[in-house]
Image: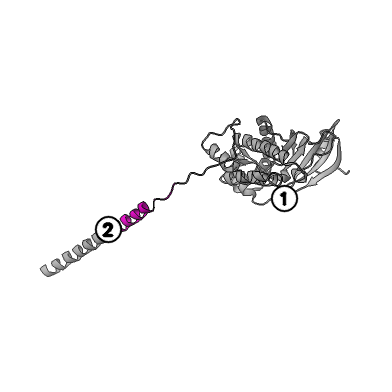
């Protein structure tokens, strides 16, 4: 096929030998199957900011930092240079996350580098060499659903332990090869410690995956992994070895109505007393003025 303009520099530099086909085109990027020497890989071409349809990007960028102070100031001001740097940070977020998650034991495509907005990475295939299907295209038994759901919860746990939340995890961002689930699409990865939306995004990720697998194993619908995981995380008790149960008991303290009413009555009495003191003080001032007038 014709070589896309953004991939041409990689061909010129010998990083890519042939573009075989387009695999998909999404809201953030287009993905192509390419040949690099004797190896088949994929090239993810990130779309320019003006062409992306990804919504609420600001919520995902919150907490992302750059070490260079000049770049940071430019990004805050929104200058042309700043927008260019913001794009690089956005694109590199996926590369950084892929390396970090692979080291943490999470199955993700192996990255081979990002070159001017083009990410070269492993093409996930089955044993016959065909591109692995997305989770949403896979049918499975109840037993398989329970097993794969457990694997995914372990991956999310390991991600959180290294401070990363996918942010857009669903059955459309998971591939399934002969060895199980593989998590993909991480340019919107969220910093769990620095992003105010972290808890909400973690819950959405986990519940999306739960709801999909629950189609095949209805008992999964009752699990509470999101609440359990976040509670352990904020207490500093979450580790890669944590044995999750999927259960979460919310500790609710029963309201003491009598005590609340007493506090209200005490506050009302205090306010009435304050007003009475002010009234008496004012009357005292007025009386003093009257006496001075009589004296004159």
| Mark 2 Cα shell of 10 Å, populated few (<14), some (14-19), many (≥20) | few
* Residue 234 makes an appearance in the image: yes
Near-viewer residue (211 or 11): 211
Kindly give the residue lying farthest to the left in the view shown.
295
Q: How many marks?
A: 2
| In this rendering, position of residue 276 left or right of residue 75 | left
Please provide percent x and percent y for residue 153: 65, 38
In terms of depth relative to the viewer, which is nearer, 22 or 289? 22
Please give the range of residues in magenta: 253-268
Per the image, label 1 sits on a secondary structure element best described as: loop
Q: Nearer the viewer, residue 246 or 14?
A: 246
**Which one is earlier in the sequence, the residue at label 1 or at label 2?**
1
Q: Is residue 109 magenta?
A: no
Callout 2 secondary element = helix
Name the residue carrying label 2. 274
Residue highlighted by disc 1: 52
Q: Are marks 1 and 2 in contact (CB under 8 Å)?
A: no
Quadrant containing the N terminus is: top right
Residue 294's place in the image compared with 1, above or below, is below
Indicate the quadrant containing the C terminus: top left, top right, bottom left or bottom right: bottom left
The answer to whether residue 167 is visible is no
Given residues 143 and 265, the one toward you in this image is 143
What distance separates the C-alpha of mark 1 from that of mark 2? 61 Å
Q: Quadrant of residue 42?
A: top right
Specify the farthest residue to the right: 1
Q: What's the magenta bit mostly, secondary-structure-wise?
A: helix
The quarter of the displayed image where residue 179 is located: top right
Q: Which mark is residue 150?
A: none
**112 sits left or right of 205 in the view:** right
Residue 46 drawn at (x, y percent) = 74, 44
Residue 263 lies within the magenta run: yes
Image coordinates of residue 90 in percent, x first then y, are 67, 42
């Amino acid at each position: 096929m014709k070589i896309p303009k953004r991939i041409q520099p990689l061909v010129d530099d010998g990083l890519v030998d042939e573009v075989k086909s387009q695999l998909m085109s999404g809201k953030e990027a287009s993905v192509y199957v390419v040949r690099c020497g004797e190896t088949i890989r994929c090239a993810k071409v990130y779309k320019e900011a003006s062409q992306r349809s990804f919504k609420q990007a600001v919520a995902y960028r919150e907490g992302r930092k750059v070490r260079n102070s000049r770049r940071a100031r430019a990004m805050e001001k929104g200058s042309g240079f700043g927008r260019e740097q913001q794009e690089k940070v956005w694109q590199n977020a996926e590369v950084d996350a892929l390396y970090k998650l692979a080291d943490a034991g999470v199955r993700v495509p192996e990255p081979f580098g990002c070159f001017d907005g083009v990410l070269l990475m492993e093409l996930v295939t089955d044993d016959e060499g065909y591109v692995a299907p997305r989770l949403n295209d896979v049918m499975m038994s109840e037993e398989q659903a329970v097993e794969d759901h457990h694997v995914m919860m372990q991956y999310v746990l390991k991600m959180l332990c290294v401070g990363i939340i996918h942010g857009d995890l669903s059955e459309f961002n998971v591939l399934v090869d002969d060895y199980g689930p593989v998590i993909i699409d991480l340019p919107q990865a969220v910093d769990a410690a620095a992003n105010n939306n972290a808890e909400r995004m973690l819950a959405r990720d986990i519940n999306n995956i739960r709801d999909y697998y629950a189609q095949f194993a209805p008992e999964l619908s009752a699990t509470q992994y999101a609440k359990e995981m976040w509670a352990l995380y904020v207490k500093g008790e979450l580790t890669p070895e944590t044995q999750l149960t999927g259960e979460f008991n919310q500790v609710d303290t029963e309201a003491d109505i009598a005590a609340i009413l007493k506090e209200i009555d005490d506050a009302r009495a205090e306010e009435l007393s304050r007003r009475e003191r002010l009234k008496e003080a004012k009357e005292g001032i007025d009386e003093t003025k009257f006496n001075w007038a009589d004296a004159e």
